[in-house]
Amino acid sequence: MAPTAGGQGSGARLRSDGLEGQAGSGSRAGSGSRAASSAPAESGSAAEVGQTSSRVSFQTEPARYRHWRLAIEPPVATLAMDVAEDGGLDAGYELKLNSYDLGVDIELYDAVQRLRLEHPEVRTVVITSAKEKVFSAGANIRMLATSAHATKVNFCKFTNETRNGIEDATANSGQTYIAAVNGTASGGGYELALACQHIMLIDDRSAVVSLPELPLLGVLPGTGGLTRVTDKRQVRRDLADYFATRAEGIGGARAVAWRLVDEAVPRSEWDQSVAARAQEFAARSPRPPDGRGIQLTALDKSRSGDSIGYRHVSARLDHAAGEVSITVRGPRQDAPADVRALYHEGDAFWPLAVTRELDDLILDLRTNELELGTWVMRTEGDSQRVLAYDRLLLAGAGDWLVNEIILYLKRTLKRLDVTSRSLIALIEPGSCYAGSLLELALAADRSYMLAGQFEDSEPRAEAAAIVVGDMNLGPLPMGNGLTRLHARYLGDPDALDRVCKQVGDLLLAEDAERLGLITFAPDDIDWEDEVRIAVEERASFSADALTGMEANYRFSGPETMETKIFGRLAAWQNWIFARPNAAGPDGALRRYGTGQRARFDRKRV
Amino acid sequence: MAPTAGGQGSGARLRSDGLEGQAGSGSRAGSGSRAASSAPAESGSAAEVGQTSSRVSFQTEPARYRHWRLAIEPPVATLAMDVAEDGGLDAGYELKLNSYDLGVDIELYDAVQRLRLEHPEVRTVVITSAKEKVFSAGANIRMLATSAHATKVNFCKFTNETRNGIEDATANSGQTYIAAVNGTASGGGYELALACQHIMLIDDRSAVVSLPELPLLGVLPGTGGLTRVTDKRQVRRDLADYFATRAEGIGGARAVAWRLVDEAVPRSEWDQSVAARAQEFAARSPRPPDGRGIQLTALDKSRSGDSIGYRHVSARLDHAAGEVSITVRGPRQDAPADVRALYHEGDAFWPLAVTRELDDLILDLRTNELELGTWVMRTEGDSQRVLAYDRLLLAGAGDWLVNEIILYLKRTLKRLDVTSRSLIALIEPGSCYAGSLLELALAADRSYMLAGQFEDSEPRAEAAAIVVGDMNLGPLPMGNGLTRLHARYLGDPDALDRVCKQVGDLLLAEDAERLGLITFAPDDIDWEDEVRIAVEERASFSADALTGMEANYRFSGPETMETKIFGRLAAWQNWIFARPNAAGPDGALRRYGTGQRARFDRKRV
């Protein structure tokens, strides 16, 4: 976020990019899939152009980017921000000075994903600006000012996840991001740089970095800025305080001395220095010189008002009940014999395909279906096949692509952890909660496992069983650094030991309940009532209180920079977003750029 | 918080207890000190009886308790809750079923403090109820429903600090709190039990523990409940989820199996079991059998609309500027020769006296002066004397009373860390920021230290100097477990080493700046402008954004249960408190007890 108010228009004309139904890319959804979403104004909020009547799509590809230029000269890729002013998701603002909205960030996310999975040859990614004198002015203020509360919060969550992904690529993929800040980076612009491993700032007596949100807009930096300044870059907190109240920013030697950037480079040495630094980081990367990337083809997705379907994942949307029923299907075929065969399957390889589908589903539901507050998850398939795929991944984890697929699954499961929806896992006969798919049940707020069979409908079905696999013991940690199993037994290490001894065993409901792996194990007689009541009850509660409770319970135990960003920082920001001093008619966010000063209630809370 | 709506009255009649000017206890403030506080209704909020026109006082003593019965039979003290229904701070509610408001909690805080400092002979404190069938129904709901946002948040902060103090007594004073839950404990009632080391629940087929806030009120438990359930008692998170959605609570064996309580005891064995458990914990205490307590006499306090004065601390309130100028004075005499002499001084002993005054000032300003958003702190006195007192305390730390005084100072400084006001320390000639008092500057968001002298007014004064002492290196950690010095140099251990090597040295502005101990060191020419601009600028910013920024910056690095309660949990609760689903006219908090169901916006944010 930063000092550009963008355009002044307020019409309802919609841009074509990023909107479902015009996404192309093999989506089966035609324009017929555009559903009017119910969007009553929130109490106290004014007209909000951020409430579009079409769904946002998260699918794109480099050929369709409007805001980024991706150039690859191995081992370096350059991702240059070049935001199209008239390319906003909504028509109510202009994306001046490389300010961005969700549509710009969707392209960034796509680029980050493709660089990891399609480009083993890329070892350094340079994020820079294609504009003169400005790196990025951050999130577009008019977009924020006119967005509904939920839209702002969702936007920040997604942008945070993308920046965490950038850090994950640097830490775990040998693909290091460096920020070549060739002009002023304000607010979200500087926060994007903060997500990079190394920040170079051009030293031309005008370029600065800044976090002007507090003085100019009365809000916090929305993408981890405060936390990264103190916890990642370890700027002393009193200097950080001064910095975040100084709208005009800091550049040059002082920015280096305060640790805000790593180096300040004169314009005359700029290109050469950036290139040299990119090569240095590339030289340290373990990515294979001869790796072969796979292609991420368009998802095979169908979307209507009450259903979403992919090859391995489907969802039924029940707007009356406020519920989504999600089914994740296990592999239809046995796992390939080896990693070599995996390359042959490309993005059809089940673990990658199911992860991409789940990722897209989470983003679609989060952004487009705010009133569906409970996600009921089921799995269907053969547990042994799931475990075989897991074994293939774990055995081949030294391979860069296998590594990427596991990391992608990790990040997608983390999305669930920070999703503000109640997650309930149902474990029934025919399910395949084993290994990687068991994580869905472990991520859930509650799980229900049928003891025995459904006597009327399928009396001879095999009883539901779950299987703990090696995939549950390390490679898929939560944001707090713990596996979901570890977090589950935080107070009971003996219980964790007992579970670890049963790796690979089929655990029926009674065993699973005894081991504490599930919440409840009703039998056929109680099942329907118990599950129905749980779901109905959830829908009857305050949506906000549920969000707060889940955000706390899901992260017991240790905290990391990541959990602090999603917990502490985001919670404070949400509070500020909901307060009149920011979002009220006289609040700073709404008044910015109008020439009128904000009026503040000075009471400290 | 819990299922009692209290009374229905809504008049403005004020109760006498806990209100400044009627507090007696040597307060010099007569009724003439009652200042009408400006209390414009917040946008979107309805009539709020919680906005009293008199100041709240935090001073009381056992003889004046209306809500608690304190009985001491060494080594056990019993603190029985017996809330007077008509004893609320405001007249708009009745405190039925041992529900409580701030006034009740002020008495609890007083009791906890006196038990620590006045009663070395008490080794176990049993918290129980003097009512039939009910332990405590938690915070009074009508009080919450009719309170302004800031009042709710302030109330939760103070109750949290008191419960943290209970845990501190258990962990560090050999004074173990056990909860004898002799009837249903709901919401805040159960949260009070959660702060105790050991929870006994009467097993009579009716008594339960519960956290009904979410299902009944659409808010979170406000006093650390969710965090303590998972992080302290380590209840599995899916069971915790079920528990916190089940308004009717859980009792008996299931409460034990789920770790919600430590034991369920039949009525026939109750008295005997509680007594036995109290003796068991007492037997493990290191508190001396022959210790002599000191008496906490009434504070010598004067209070008017624009000033607050004590013996060692004073404050000037500038309502126009939104600023408080606080001055803390160092000791007037040299430290006593030894710990024995310290006992002789009693509560006049400078470190104890200044801590009590600072504690009261923080609470007074926080509760009664919401619009004074910046606290500018100064010290005055002789650094060497401060250091001598510190040395006496550190050398005598094996003594139970010395230990208590250090712990009290620690808790008081922690109050600063979670105070939602901007803290600025000014370090001028004549100041005594040394050792324990240097913590004030280290707790500040920024510090300004004059380089040299004020040439016009005091050209020959000795230049300001600060001194790092051993008191800064361990005994006064923040809530995150780090010393303020350590937290300051989180990213720069070498700098911390350098500072540690200068323990005891007088550090002038230039040295202090070089070492990173202060923020800025302007000289006489720049001083006035720099300080004025900093303070004026602060007053011009959004109060909410400042609160959010400071809450994040003050706690970089590791997190503990305590910081999670004040950061993650409280931030989410504040957000929920500000949302229409809770506090709007149709929200759950406002609708509770009216017979009308709450109406929720189902959108998930």
Image (tube, coloured by chain):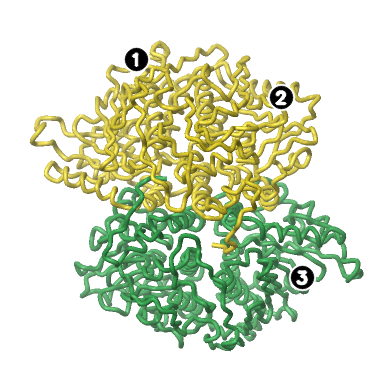
Chain colours: A green, B yellow
| Tag shown at residue B274 | 2
Q: Is residue A144 above or below residue A122?
A: above
**Point 61% across, 53% down: residue:** B598
The relative height of residue B54 versus residue A298 in the rendered view (above or below) is above
Crowding near the residue tagged with mark 3, few <14, some 14–19, many ≥20 C-alpha atoms within 10 Å: many
Instruction: Kindly report which numbered mark, 2 or 1, lies closer to the viewer in this rendering.
Output: 2
Q: Amino acid at mark 2?
A: Val
Q: Is residue A114 left or right of residue B357?
A: right
Image point (50%, 21%), residue name? B114
- Give the distance between the C-alpha atoms of the residues marked 2 and 1, in whole angstroms: 42 Å
Percent position (x, y) of residue B261?
70, 37
- Residue A171 in view: no
Q: Quadrant of residue B130?
A: top right
In this view, the residue in front, B570 or B7, is B7
Provide residue A377's location: percent of width, then percent of height: 70, 67
Q: Residue at x 37, y 45 (%)?
A: A603
Query: Does dot 3 land on a helix, a strand or a loop?
Result: helix
Left or right: A378, with A39 as reference point: right
Q: Quadrant of the N terminus of chain B?
A: top right
Where is residue A53? Give x, y as percent: 52, 77
User: Do marks 3 and 2 share a chain?
Assistant: no
Disc 2 chain ID: B
Quick check: B252 above or below B115? Answer: below
| x, y percent for residue A602 | 34, 47
Secondary structure found at label 2: helix
Chain letter of disc 3 in the image: A
Mark 2 or mark 1, earlier in chain: 2
- Label 3: which residue? A383
Q: Quadrant of residue A133?
A: bottom left
Query: Which residue position holds label 1?
Result: B336
